[in-house]
Image (cartoon, helix red, strand yellow):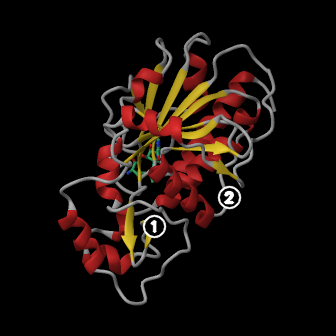
Amino acid sequence: MGRPFGVKRGNKKRKEKYDEHIEEGEQEQEEPQPKQLKTDDVSREEEAGNQEKQSEEAEGDVVHQLEGIPLGPVQSQLSKSVGVTFVLERASLEVAKVGKTYQILNSDDHTNFLKRNGRNPADYRPDIVHQALLSILDSPLNKAGKVRAVYVRTGKGVLFEVKPHVRIPRTYKRFAGIMLQLLQKLSITAAGKREKLLRMIKNPVTQYLPVNARKIGFSHSSERLVEMQDYVAAIGDDTPLVFVVGAMAHGKIETEYTDDFISISNYPLSAACCINIICDAVRKHLKFI
Ligand SMILES: C[S@@+](CC[C@H](N)C(=O)[O-])C[C@H]1O[C@@H](n2cnc3c(N)ncnc32)[C@H](O)[C@@H]1O
């Protein structure tokens, strides 16, 4: 087996840079600590995107029993159709060693650390992907078994899958702990089960999407303003839907794989609010409450 995930040769310099800029008094969360990790996550994420093989090997070796991520309710068999897919793009999930611990960087707890490393704290918003995931997983659409799959791609291009029946921690601190484990250990398995609830997968995301799917990108800046329910109704029921939503604070998703690029409100929305509108439009189209 290759070297442990995240242990990258030749980036000692960058690690030192992170380490030497730790501020006294920088808030440190008590997140689970990796035992063998030697580098910051910037390099780990870069590696992860290209290391599916290594990932598969590691997955075979390690089964992470995670109490606190129970399975959600068993999904009903409401409809035979395939269900919708969500892709959350540009999620801010970057790990660095802050003080003695590895943490998911966020603008609240790591402002000084980020500034000293030449980063803009406003870009570090992992709470956005947390809220977006909760919106998808909590939706009646998902509870009715109509969410087929959820994929998250980080700003560094690391791709992972979230099973629709997973229960993501509701508090940010616990969510960050799970994300940290996922980025370090490649997959997370339900306590007492073999099924991987979250797992790193190889890019590109398109290989996991239904062949004839309509892939719809969302942005406030799109010139095509639509009423979401009408838009969904206009697409044939046999066409699987893939919704691509940004999980970042600023900017626009840039994806080559979307067929449409639409705006669903005259107002700039949070990713979570945008997802709520999407889920409700599909729910209404499927006519269930
Ligand atoms: C916080 S916003 C990012 C802001 C960004 N300027 C934008 O709207 O593309 C997060 C995501 O929510 C979605 N979003 C926000 N407002 C929207 C709108 N009015 N129509 C469609 N999607 C929207 C987009 O996918 C966006 O990437």
Q: Disc 2 or 1, which lies upstream in sequence?
A: 1
Q: Please give the residue where the numbered disc 2 appears in the rendered image.
A: 170
User: Residue type at mark 2?
Assistant: Arg
Q: Nearer the viewer, mark 2 or mark 1?
A: 1
**What residue do we see at 42% from left, 37% from top?**
55
| Whole-percent x, y for residue 258 in the image | 38, 26
Q: Is residue 118 visible?
A: no
User: Residue type at mark 1?
Assistant: Gln
**What residue do we see at 28% from left, 72% from top?**
18
Q: From the viewer's perspective, is residue 64 above or below residue 103?
A: above
| Whole-percent x, y for residue 8 in the image | 27, 53
Q: From the viewer's perspective, is residue 34 above or below residue 265?
A: below
Task: Say which mark, if any, is on residue 103.
Answer: 1
Q: Secondary structure at mark 1?
A: strand
**What residue do we see at 71% from left, 54% from top?**
67
The span from disc 2 to disc 1 (Cα, nearest Å) is 18 Å
**What residue do we see at 47% from left, 11% from top?**
212
Quarter of the image holding residue 85? top right
Task: Say which mark, if any, is on residue 199.
Answer: none
- Pick the residue in front: 225 or 102: 102
Quarter of the image holding residue 96? bottom left
| Whole-percent x, y for residue 242 in the image | 51, 26
Quarter of the image holding residue 37? bottom left
